[in-house]
Amino acid sequence: MRTISRKGEGPGELDRPEGLAVFSDGRIGVMDFAKVGLQMFARDGTFLEGIRFATEAGIPGIPFHAMPDHSVVTASALPSRREWRVVPRGVAGPSA
């Protein structure tokens, strides 16, 4: 076990982590509700990117799951239980 981040509001820092998923390539995604998004880290803990969610259509919930195509699937927590599919380096929002 190792620490990959610390509490904070800057890039790569976590304010309200609620869950994580490990992708098949070793990347780690941490859901941070304070940042309303997914924080992505390399297997060695290096911060890669932060992905903000488009909250107009709802807020993604937990648990969430890393998929073989490197997307993340979760259900909306609010306002309805719609499926979300998030593609790192792509657009984040609920599935149609």
Image (cartoon, helix red, strand yellow):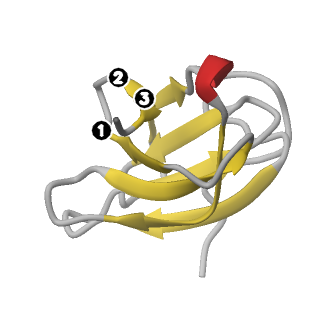
Disc number at residue 39? none
Q: Secondary structure at mark 3?
A: strand
Quarter holding the N terminus is: bottom right
Where is mark 2, residue-wise? 91
Kindly indicate the quadrant of the structure image that contains residue 9: top right
Looking at the image, which residue is at 65% across and 23% down? Answer: 55
Amino acid of disc 1 = Val
The 10 Å Cα crowd at callout 3, few under 14, some 14 to 19, many 20 or more, is: many
Spatial distance from mark 1 to mark 3, Cα to Cα?
7 Å
Q: Are marks 2 and 1 in contact (CB under 8 Å)?
A: yes
Quarter holding the C terminus is: top left
The percent coordinates of residue 89 (x first, y second) are 29, 26
Q: Secondary structure at mark 2?
A: loop
The percent coordinates of residue 46 (x first, y second) are 45, 44
The vertical placement of 67 against 10, above or below, is below
Q: Secondary structure at mark 1?
A: loop
Q: Are marks 3 and 2 in contact (CB under 8 Å)?
A: yes
- Left or right: where 65 falls relative to 89: right
The vertical placement of 35 against 43, above or below, is above
Q: Are marks 1 and 3 in contact (CB under 8 Å)?
A: yes
Where is mark 3, residue-wise? 92
Amino acid of disc 3 = Ala
The vertical placement of 77 against 25, above or below, is above
- Residue furthest to the left: 69
The first of marks 1 and 3 along the sequence is: 1
Amino acid of disc 2 = Val
- Left or right: where 29 falls relative to 57: left
Spatial distance from mark 3 to mark 2, Cα to Cα?
4 Å
Disc number at residue 87? 1
